[in-house]
Every structure is written in C-alpha cells, then in structure tokens.
Image: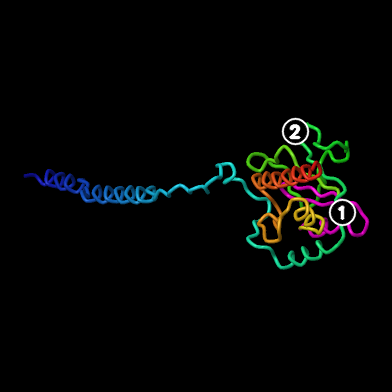
Amino acid sequence: MPRSRLLAGAKRRRAVSVVDLTADDSNDDKKNDNHNSKNKKSIKKKRAPKKSSPGKTKKEVNEKRQFRLRKSCPQSLRDRFDRALAQRMYLIRKEKVMTGGNQSETAAAATDMARPPTSSRTASTTSGANAAPSFYWKFAMLGSTGNIYDVCLQHVPTCSCPDFARRGDLCKHLIFVLVRCVGLVVDHPLAYQKAYITSELHELNSRIEERNNNNNNNNNN
C-alpha cells in the first residue's frame, strides 16, 4: 500500500471525536435529583384550620384589638380604682349617640356631642372587622376639682381630662363610668382594658340599657 494512503488513513483515525457515553447518564441523574428535591420542598404538611371560639362569628375572631388585651388588672390601676371611687364625682348627663346620621337618644340637644373627643393616643377609624359600631355612649362628668369632662365608651375609650391626655390610659372619670354607670367590678375583664372589640362594646351597651330600665322601673314604682 502506498505510503500516502497510509498517512491519510492515520489522519482520519485521529480526527474521529471521542464521545463520552456516561455524560448523558450523569446529567439525567442530576436532573432527576433536582426534580426530586423540588418536589420535596413543594410538599408541605397541611395544617388543620384553627377552631373558632364557640359563640363567636368569623368577623369577631378576626377582629384585632387596638391595644393589647390585659389578662389581669395591673396593680397601678387597682390603686387608681380605689382613689377614683373614694372621691366625689357626679354624673351630669349621659347619652347614646348614633353615628349613622341619626340623632342621639337623649331629650337634650347637644350639638357639641356630635363626635367623640379625639386624643393623640386614639387610633384612626378603620374599616372591616374594626369598623366602629353605629353608636357610642357619652357621659358628662363633674370631677372632684369642679371641672366637667366628657367620657366616651367606644373602641378606644377616651376622656377629655388632662390625665388621660397625658397617660392615654384609664383615668378616674373612666373608672367612675365603668363602675357606677356600667356596673362593672374591678376584676371584671372589661373594667381595665385600654381598648374594646365590637362584641364587648355591645355587652357594655346592654349593661347600660339594663341599668337604665331598672332605674326607670324604680322611679315609676
């Protein structure tokens, strides 16, 4: 065989590319591993739905209190309760003010009571579960110093006195209203809260109206 033909054959053999047959298998294995790991991450344990408290609607369960719930009455408030109930204070007027465009449920016209007093600590009006009910109770209190203050029972109770404006917590006028006008005791859960949810406001309203009915019946008798 001529030498030129041998050289041409050798060049052809050198030009043949080497194919790694194991490369495809390893890539497939890597793809399968990645796919399995993604599947494991995507599989999550299904949590059981939270059970709502009996007697409460879904709206009440989801409603957020504007201040943290107090589980017990702080000692500082207990001392304030004692001082508030020992001082001479008088209720001048109380009324249930309707906020849905209706007039208040009192005989006396009070244009200055169209809206509750605002405070720097009072949260802004919200919508949804935290939306204010269509009423609030307003009390005109004669304090021990001879000044008249307005107390409002709403989602965040307010008072127009300087003490409430400074501390943003229950003052002696609010305590007087909760005890003397609503009929709560010191250890009642609604007596020492900084904020209420809608169902609690309705409970306070029921207590006030019940006491009003009892007083009217006693006066008639």
120 or 20, nearer to the observer: 120
The image quarter containing residue 113 is top right
Task: Tell me the kind of residue under disc 1.
Answer: Tyr
Q: Which mark is residue 90?
A: 1
Q: Residue visible at 46% across and 47% down?
A: 49
Q: Which mark is residue 100?
A: 2
- 1 or 2: tag closer to the N-terminus: 1
Dot 2 falls on a residue whose secondary structure is loop
Task: Tell me the kind of residue under disc 2.
Answer: Gly
The answer to whether residue 11 is seen in the rendering is yes
Q: For marks 1 and 2, give the one nearer the viewer.
A: 1
220 or 182, nearer to the observer: 220
196 or 94, nearer to the observer: 94
Q: CA distance from mark 1 to mark 2?
A: 29 Å
Q: Answer whether residue 153 is magenta in the image.
A: yes
Across and down, in percent, residue 163 comes to 84, 59
The stretch in magenta equals 141-169
